[in-house]
Image (cartoon, rainbow, N blue to C red):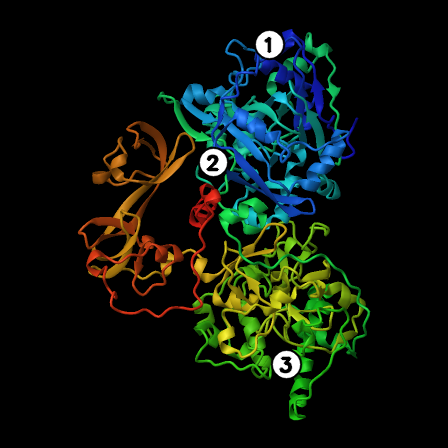
């Protein structure tokens, strides 16, 4: 039956039943099914002839070793999930089968596949299964030639024949041993190749696929829900960590198909066909990649993973030169950018396209059952890369299964709130103004009158005048003994919440001697000080003239010290800065999978108009940061007389928005606090704070707590590992805390200063004779002396197989005397002698001159280290260095006769349970891999 979400022109997932004669020529049959349109869906099923068997018996594979099984830990909610793979100890197939069929991991009872599918998505985050994935090898008998996954004889074999390169899992077969709920997340094949998957035995496997013509739509949807991953890597879906349920695809109109693969059946995925799926129980599948001539255009345009150096990359030179010689020169010049027509079959299908199909032409494909819950070198063969699941050596604490928590440690964190929605039912005070007389004073970034250039946004900026009006009123009230004002709340908040208290800060006192330099620079903006509208306006204007030019987008732009020290107004914004790309993803405002991710007033190129207020000088994007236009357009002569400081932080200035209980918050703070919710996402108003747990208000800001007697506002926490540092969003931004979008269901990833990587440009250079701390060859850190400063030259080369190295010595280049002649020109072909003694071809990229320091330890041993590996005595040492810091032998009795003061509040380091010791991974290793 046809799918409800089936794309136009697609015939759905097609099923083919070839005869034994047709089955003998794999490449020809692939051409045939494409002539029938099978490639349009991105996935096809092939049921081989009954008399064909790939292996006589599977009874002798019990001792086959699965070297690196992975436990799949899934976190997420509402149909959006992230999958983490934790490597487990090796096991045999017999052991794996026993585990898979145990009560803990066996399949649940079900009446049909639809019921099992519902149970899968309902329980995907529970009881993490173990997947015996990426096992190098084949189960085919050596005498089986038809559709042998290990030797398909397609044009992809050109890589091995011409280059001698073997890429495990790409041009060699992999075995996959599955159990109930083991999953392959949404992805396309490496280099957007074809793939073939044969299910040898066991329980079925369910597949989802998105037609190639709609692949970009799926990518856009994933980027919207996982902006953090998207910013780190454009092709983050290749990590195979992202799960999106059929219900989400259906909701956002992404066409998809689904089908079930039984034992003894083949599944073919086509270039740029996104697919995902799960196993129904214990089974074994064999898979590899292959190619046709149609793939070459996909390979040339494939967007590859940019965050891993061991990614699979195939040079397209040999394919273009051999199969597209007329386009070779154009391709070398980078001008071969013809759009791909996903509907066209491979050129090999020409014999079937005009009634020339012979026996193949008489066969009608049947539709599978699916539904819509939606330069040549001769070298020895090399093994240069692998296609493997990304293994996470450490995962966030909140995604670990209960029985694994002890091995990774736990830390108290605030739990996400439940969704809640409250209706506004209170009354507000209004002030009628004739807004037309203010139009001439409200200007856009280019100096034109807003009413002349864009009258629709004129009303938007009038609200800024409120701050000026209230400033006049507050000055008068100060003369009248500082009378406090009372507000009627619209929606309820927790009874003890500080939001119910008056926002005045008469009890707060800042000791400027105790604050940090950045805090002293912002002293006029602290809420406990006297209000100066001129100071706030000047601050807003200065911030609007610096990147990213928007008061809310500045959340993802950490302050530099020279910016804080600067008291000048800066140069005017150039014409090209009238429109910029907003930094805040729409997901940060939505906060759930229920809202729409479409952003209003966003140009096709992704930019948005910048508008600013001539009264308070706040500058924002019209698309995302202060979309208050609907409300003001309907009430163009009524303006709110109420004005207050942000109730979530301690600083003034910036763009404010009304809350549902008649207070005000920075839009920046509302975005940063996970539990704050924009009731009307399109209008960005009001902000509902009732879901913020009381525990969050009890957190103390590590930046402003030293200078205040009473904690105010609401803090966020560092997202890095087990760090529990807390801070106000505005304090963190000013202090230099780095923030970037996180993936669903979180919003912002905070990295406090002590965990942010060392900025080498700001590190002081070392001098000869200087005492430093460095890592000894025994793995511990000792004091040592800098004996020599060296500038080392390293070469960066991209090898013919796509891999690269950036730490080659000049002596490693064998076809040129680089020591005497210097480095080759950029782009020159070079021959590199590798550590295995073999010579590999590659292309020279650049020469890097890096300062090195030769240090000498007390035992007179010397080593050469980079600056980032050497620490001055007055530098704050990272925790991992402090833990391994030792005293040299002549000082080992230092302080032995001095009684040390016992720290009563100190705690012993937790000891890992021996049961989980094998599974514990150092956080530093995990961060190094993920980065």
Q: Image height check: is 417 above or below 225?
A: below
Examine the image and state in which quarter residue 258 appears. top right
Q: CA distance from mark 1 to mark 2?
A: 34 Å
- Disc 2 marks which residue? 311
The numbered disc on residue 24 is: 1
Place of residue 303 in the rendered image (x, y in percent of width and height, measured from the top left): 54, 37
Q: Is residue 361 left or right of residue 856?
A: right
Coordinates of residue 920 in the picture (x, y in percent): 46, 45
Residue at 23% x, 48% y: name it: 863
Horizontal arrangement in the rendering, residue 270 relative to residue 892 (left or right): right
The local crowd at label 3, few if under 14, some if 14 to 19, many if 20 or more residues have their Cα within 10 Å, is some
Q: Nearer the viewer, residue 818 or 760?
A: 760
On screen, residue 359 versus residue 807, left or right, reads: right
Furthest-bottom residue in view?
Answer: 480
Total marks in image: 3
The crowd level at tag 2 (other Cα within 10 Å; few <14, some 14-19, many 20+) is many
* In this view, the mark in front (3 or 2): 3
Q: Position of 321 compared to 796: left or right?
A: right
Instruction: Check the image and report above or below for 842 versus 893.
Output: above
Residue 377 seen: yes
Q: Secondary structure at mark 3?
A: loop
| Label whose residue precedes the other's in the sequence (3 or 1) | 1
Residue 554 in percent (x, y) is at: 55, 63
Assign a secondary structure to mark 2: loop
Quadrant into which the N terminus falls? top right
Q: Position of residue 637 (x, y in %)?
A: 79, 74
Measured Cα–Cα span from mark 3 to mark 1: 83 Å
């Amino acid at each position: 039956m046809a799918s409800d979400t089936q794309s136009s022109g697609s015939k759905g997932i097609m099923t083919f039943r070839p005869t034994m004669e047709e089955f003998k020529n794999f490449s020809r049959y692939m051409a045939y099914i494409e002539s029938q349109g099978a490639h349009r869906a991105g996935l096809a099923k092939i049921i081989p002839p009954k008399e064909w068997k790939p292996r006589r018996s599977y009874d002798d594979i019990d001792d086959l070793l699965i070297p690196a099984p992975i436990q799949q830990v899934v976190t997420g909610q509402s149909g959006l999930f992230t999958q983490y793979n934790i490597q487990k100890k090796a096991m045999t197939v017999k052991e794996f089968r026993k585990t898979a069929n145990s009560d803990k991991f066996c399949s649940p009872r079900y009446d049909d596949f639809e019921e099992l599918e519902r149970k899968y998505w309902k329980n995907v985050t529970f009881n993490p299964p173990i997947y015996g994935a990426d096992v190098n090898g084949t189960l085919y008998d050596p005498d089986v030639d038809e559709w042998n996954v290990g030797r398909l004889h397609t044009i992809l074999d050109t890589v091995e024949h011409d280059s001698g390169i073997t890429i495990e899992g790409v041009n060699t077969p992999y075995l996959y041993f599955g159990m109930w709920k083991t999953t392959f997340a949404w992805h396309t094949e490496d280099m957007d190749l074809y793939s073939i998957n044969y299910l040898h035995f066991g329980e079925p496997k369910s597949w989802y696929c998105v037609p190639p013509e709609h692949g970009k739509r799926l990518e856009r949807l994933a980027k919207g829900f996982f902006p953090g991953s998207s910013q780190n890597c454009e092709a983050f879906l290749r990590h195979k960590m992202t799960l999106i349920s059929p219900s989400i695809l259906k909701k956002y109109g992404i066409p998809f198909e689904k089908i079930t693969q039984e034992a003894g059946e083949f599944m073919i995925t086509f270039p740029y066909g996104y697919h995902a799926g799960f196993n129904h129980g214990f089974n074994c599948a064999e898979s590899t990649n292959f190619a046709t001539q149609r793939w070459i255009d996909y390979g040339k345009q494939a967007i590859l993973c940019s965050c891993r150096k061991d990614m699979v990359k195939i040079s397209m030179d040999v394919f273009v030169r051999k199969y597209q010689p007329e386009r070779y020169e154009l391709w070398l010049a980078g001008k071969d950018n013809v759009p791909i027509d996903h509907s066209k079959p491979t050129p090999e299908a020409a014999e079937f396209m005009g009634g020339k199909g012979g026996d193949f032409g008489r066969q009608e494909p049947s539709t599978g059952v699916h539904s819509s819950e939606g330069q040549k070198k001769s070298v020895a063969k090399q093994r240069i890369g692998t296609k493997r699941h990304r293994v996470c050596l450490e995962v966030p604490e909140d995604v670990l299964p209960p029985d694994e928590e002890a091995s990774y440690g736990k830390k108290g964190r605030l739990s996400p709130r439940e969704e809640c929605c409250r209706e506004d039912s209170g009354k507000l005070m209004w002030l009628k103004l004739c807004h037309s007389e203010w139009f001439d004073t409200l200007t856009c970034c280019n100096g034109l009158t807003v009413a002349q250039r864009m009258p629709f946004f004129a009303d938007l900026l009038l609200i800024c005048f409120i701050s000026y009006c209230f400033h006049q009123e507050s000055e008068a009230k100060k003369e009248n003994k500082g009378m406090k004002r009372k507000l009627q709340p619209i929606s309820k908040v927790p009874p003890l919440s500080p939001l119910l208290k008056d926002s005045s800060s008469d009890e707060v006192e800042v000791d400027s001697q105790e604050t940090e330099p950045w805090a002293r620079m912002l002293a006029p903006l602290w809420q406990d000080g006297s209000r100066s509208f001129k100071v706030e306006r000047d601050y807003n204007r200065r911030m609007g003239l610096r990147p990213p030019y928007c008061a809310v987008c500045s959340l993802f732009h950490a302050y530099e010290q020279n910016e804080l020290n600067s008291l000048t107004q800066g140069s005017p914004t150039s014409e090209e800065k009238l429109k910029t790309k907003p930094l805040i993803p729409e997901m940060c405002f939505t906060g759930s999978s229920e809202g729409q991710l479409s952003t209003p007033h966003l140009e096709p190129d992704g930019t948005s108009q910048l508008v600013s207020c001539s009264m308070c000088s706040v500058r924002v994007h019209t698309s995302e940061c202060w979309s208050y236009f609907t409300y003001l357009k309907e009430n163009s002569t009524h303006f709110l007389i109420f004005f207050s400081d942000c109730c979530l932080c301690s600083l003034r200035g910036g763009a404010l928005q009304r809350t549902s209980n008649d207070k005000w918050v920075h839009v920046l703070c509302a975005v940063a606090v996970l539990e704050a919710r924009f009731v009307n996402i399109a209008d960005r108003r009001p902000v509902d704070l009732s879901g913020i747990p009381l525990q969050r208000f009890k957190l103390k800001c590590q930046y402003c707590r030293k200078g205040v007697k009473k904690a105010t506002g609401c803090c966020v926490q560092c997202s890095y590992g087990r760090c529990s540092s807390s801070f106000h969003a505005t304090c963190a931004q000013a202090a230099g805390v780095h923030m970037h979008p996180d993936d669903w269901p979180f919003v912002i990833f905070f990295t406090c200063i002590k965990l942010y990587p060392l900025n080498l440009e700001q590190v002081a250079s070392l001098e000869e004779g200087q005492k430093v701390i460095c890592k000894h060859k025994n793995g511990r850190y000792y004091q040592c002396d800098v004996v020599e400063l060296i500038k080392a030259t390293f070469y960066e080369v991209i090898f013919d197989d796509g891999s690269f190295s950036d730490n080659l010595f000049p002596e490693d280049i064998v076809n040129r005397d680089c020591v005497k002649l210097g480095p080759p020109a950029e782009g020159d072909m070079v021959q590199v002698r590798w550590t295995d003694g073999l010579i590999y071809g590659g292309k020279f990229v650049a020469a890097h001159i890096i300062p090195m320091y030769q240090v000498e330890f007390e035992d007179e041993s010397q080593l050469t280290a980079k600056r980032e590996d050497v620490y001055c005595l007055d530098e704050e040492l990272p925790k991992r260095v402090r833990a391994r810091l030792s005293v040299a032998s002549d000082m080992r009795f230092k302080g032995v006769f001095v009684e040390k003061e016992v720290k009563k509040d100190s705690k012993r380091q937790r000891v890992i349970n021996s049961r989980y010791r094998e599974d514990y991974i150092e956080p530093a290793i995990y961060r190094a891999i993920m980065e």
